[in-house]
Amino acid sequence: MDGQATFLKEEKPPKVGCYTCKNFAELKTPRHIKDEIYIYGYCFKKNGVWEGIDQKGYAVYLPEGTCKEHKK
């Protein structure tokens, strides 16, 4: 090497699972609940149909997976 430092840009891993679903709302920073439990976002599905303002989200603890209601 010629004495110059080379910095590699850290790239985020590709989004998979819930991150690719239209029903998923990702939190900017995961919310710490206790110990090693975090909420990464909320899923706003109800039989695959959006219910408007009254729709309640389900907390997503493992965003790498998918459910049967997953929609890209």
Image: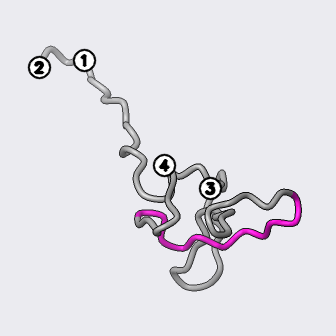
12 on left or right of 31 = left
- Residue identifier under label 2: 1
- Cα–Cα gap, marks 1 and 4: 39 Å
Q: Residues within 10 Å of mark 3 (few under 14, many from 20)?
A: many
Q: Residues within 10 Å of mark 4 (few under 14, many from 20)?
A: some
Query: Residue 21: x, y in percent?
Result: 53, 52
Query: Residue 3: x, y in percent?
Result: 20, 18
- Which of the 4 image quarters holds residue 50? bottom right
- Cα–Cα gap, marks 4 and 3: 9 Å
- Cα–Cα gap, marks 2 and 3: 49 Å
- Residue identifier under label 3: 23
Q: Residues within 10 Å of mark 2 (few under 14, many from 20)?
A: few
Give the extent of the magenta segment: 53-64
Query: Residue 12: x, y in percent?
Result: 40, 42
- Cα–Cα gap, marks 2 and 1: 7 Å
Instruction: Looking at the image, tell me whether mark 1 or mark 3 is earlier in sequence order.
Output: 1
Label disc, if present, on residue 4 of the rendered structure = 1
Helix, strand or loop for disc 1: loop
What amino acid type is highlighted by mark number 3?
A: Asn
Q: Residues within 10 Å of mark 1 (few under 14, many from 20)?
A: few
